[in-house]
Image (tube, coloured by chain):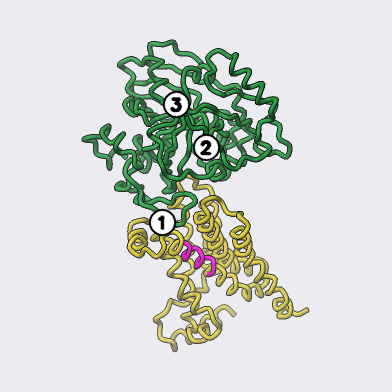
Chain colours: A green, B yellow
Amino acid sequence: MLIKQAPDILSSEITPEDLYRNRREFIRTASGAALGFVGVAGLAEVPGGLSAAPQQDLLDLRTSQFSTDDTANTFEEITSYNNFYEFGIDKEDPKRYADELNVEPWSVRVEGHINKPAADYTLEDILAPHPLEERIYRLRCVEAWSMVVPWVGFPLADLIKRFDPTSRANYVKFETLVRPDEFRGQRTRSLQWPYVEGLRMDEAMNPLAILAVGLYGKTLLNQNGAPIRLIVPWKYGFKSIKSIVKIEFVEDQPKNSWNVAIPSEYGFYANVNPEVDHPRWSQASERRIGNFFRQRTTKFNGYGDQVASMYDGMNLAENY
Amino acid sequence: MSTGQLIRRTKPAAFILCLTPALVLTWDWFTDGLSVNPIEDITHRTGDWTLRFVLVTLAVTPLRWFSGWNALIRYRRMVGLFAFFYATLHFSTYIVFDHFFDIVSIAEDVIERKYVTAGFLGFILMVPLAITSTQNWVRRLGKRWKSLHRLIYVTAIAGVVHFLWLVKLETGEPLIYAAVLALLLGARLVRRYVVNPSVRPPPPVDEPSHRSRFRNREESRRTA
């Protein structure tokens, strides 16, 4: 069992001992709370308008055979360079405006072709049965940069099994929260809101696909898609939808936001593929954040062993 | 204070002002003020400033018309050369940091990616303008200097198109540049064809010099 020491912890981020004890107590007594995932609203007030998201430690994490040995990017890098158009189009916007979003309380609507009841489930309901594990994954953005992120989450497949989809559920569709009062980017029409993404059922059931609730052993910051987001490491980053409020099991292929915005440039599949260039730039290489030299991009972002067979016989240049 | 004195005294200040973006960049470089993708950050900032300086250069002439302050022309060369300075930084960042002299991938980029083609064209066309910016060259080229330097219009258009073609979705910012450029070029068209249609600029380049001199006299008589 790996308990990772998060680097670069500001002293202001360290949980005061009494709160820590309270939380441990809460965790012991709360039924089903198999994870250290409790909001402590009192920590939210940081003077000076600094990012105030109350980050919690996520404890007792499992390790995963799917984690990469690549050196992870720093916490600072991962949390200050983000594409999250809900907060604005600049990479620095999500961090800058992160504290304008309140993610508590949070619920996720699960509906569609499932045998279990469609309902709004609290985040605690969603998470309760799932032990958390650390997954150190490569993340390749369609803009030809990449990072390595030590996510904390659980397999999407495990959640899907709980809701027992019917045979008509060919795809899983996800939606991000719409709240223009707090997501300033949603006050303009850069993309369609809500942000929509989707996976084919076999992709969603692939063991590499996870729902992430944390990184570097702590709950997600808002700029990284708190409190719960998708991670599909063999696809370009825009598939890994953030701040999910709805999971729907559908028959037809969902219309994902970037595909709707520019269909000729962004497809549904969005598998990382150095052989299929973006119409306006090359996908052959990428810049790993923190590195000076570009490096070659690998097909399926290096996860071909786990995912390539799902696309046998498919023309990946057409299904970009 | 005479205009000449005023210009002599304000030019160093204008120089420092034009250099400020580079100084800020240098400062950020050494104080960790760049984003975690510093190469992208430098590329974007130098690109932005190239476009801004190109547009300021193009604004000098219309400003003279509206303000009547003809002395503005005496800052234009400096501003234009700063545009070239930032373009060179932008281009070098691309060559050195982004592709590390990988000629094959650069050539591929220039040929295959139309936004790179546009940017490359805009930059290449600036080179002869920078070279012929000296007093000596102005004299040597005479009338042809002006025709040659109209290439700045192509550079400006290529620069804006370069920006428009490279953004993912967020066309807001490049469209602002496009609008400003349209305004500056539009002002010229309006003046040439609407306000003052009798004054035609001489046809470009390869006209025999005696004729152009002759025509020049004609023109000055007509407009007098």
At numbered mark 1, what does the secondary structure look like: helix, strand or loop?
helix
Residue that protrudes farthest toward the left in the picture: A313
Residue B158 occupies which quadrant of the picture?
A: bottom left
Instruction: Compute the Cα span from label 3 to label 1.
Output: 41 Å
Q: Residue at x 32, y 22 (%)?
A: A170
The foreground one among A258 and A79 is A79
Q: What is the chain letter for disc 3?
A: A
Disc 3 + disc 2, Cβ < 8 Å: no
Is the residue under label 1 in contact with that under label 2 (CB below 8 Å)? no
Quadrant of residue A249 in the image? Answer: top left
Give the residue pinned by disc 2: A189
- Please state, as top left, top right, bottom left or bottom right, where the C terminus of chain A lies in the image: top left
- Circle 2 packing at 10 Å, graded few (<14), some (14-19), many (20+), is few
The residue that label 1 is drawn on is B115
Q: Is residue B200 above or below residue A5?
A: below
Residue at image location 48% in from the left, 49% down from the top: A289
In this rendering, which labeled residue sits more in front, label 3 or label 1?
3
Same chain under badges 3 and 2? The reply is yes
Residue A313 drawn at (x, y percent):
21, 35
Amino acid under label 2? Arg
Question: Which amino acid, by three-letter code, is at mark 3?
Answer: Phe
Q: Which residues are magenta?
A: B85-93
For residue A118, above or below residue A9: above
**Image coords of residue A228 (percent x, y):** 51, 28
Give me the residue at 44% from left, 48% from top.
A145
